[in-house]
Image (cartoon, rainbow, N blue to C red):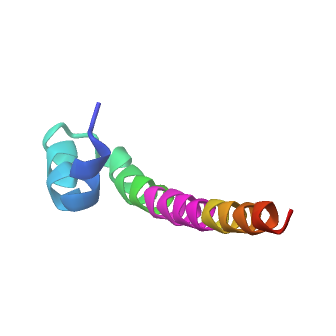
Amino acid sequence: MLDIKLVRTNPELVKENIKKKFQDEKLALVDEVIEFDQKFRAAKTRSDELRAQRNQKSKQIGGLM
């Protein structure tokens, strides 16, 4: 199993290793994993921002009560 940090930082190294194993059909998967990782990280960031906003609003509501 590959560490996502390795795929994220050195995709060419991962692709070279796949080529060495003669599994060229899996080369496209590296780019797909990177794309999904970027989408996941963007969604996680957005989720964290929304959670922070919710906490801020909850604190304001609590202060008004």
Residue 23 quadrant:
top left
Say which of 19 and 4 sits in front. Answer: 4
* Residue 40 x, y percent position in the rendering: 52, 57
| In the displayed structure image, the side of residue 61 where residue 11 appears, left or right | left
17 relative to 48, above or below: above
Q: Main secondary structure of the magenta part?
A: helix
Residue at the outermost top position: 1
| In the displayed structure image, the side of residue 17 where residue 5 appears, left or right | right
Residue 45 is a magenta residue: yes
Where the N terminus falls, by quadrant?
A: top left
Residue at the outermost right position: 65
Count of labels in the image: 0
| In the displayed structure image, the side of residue 54 where residue 37 appears, left or right | left
The magenta span reads 37-49
Residue 13 is a magenta residue: no
* Residue 8 x, y percent position in the rendering: 28, 58
Q: Residue at x 67, y 69 (%)?
A: 53
Residue 60 quadrant:
bottom right
Q: Residue at x 67, y 60 (%)?
A: 55
Say which of 57 and 36 sits in front. Answer: 57
25 relative to 32, above or below: above
* Residue 43 x, y percent position in the rendering: 58, 62
20 relative to 64, above or below: above
Where the C terminus falls, by quadrant?
A: bottom right
| In the displayed structure image, the side of residue 5 where residue 63 appears, left or right | right
Residue 57 quadrant:
bottom right
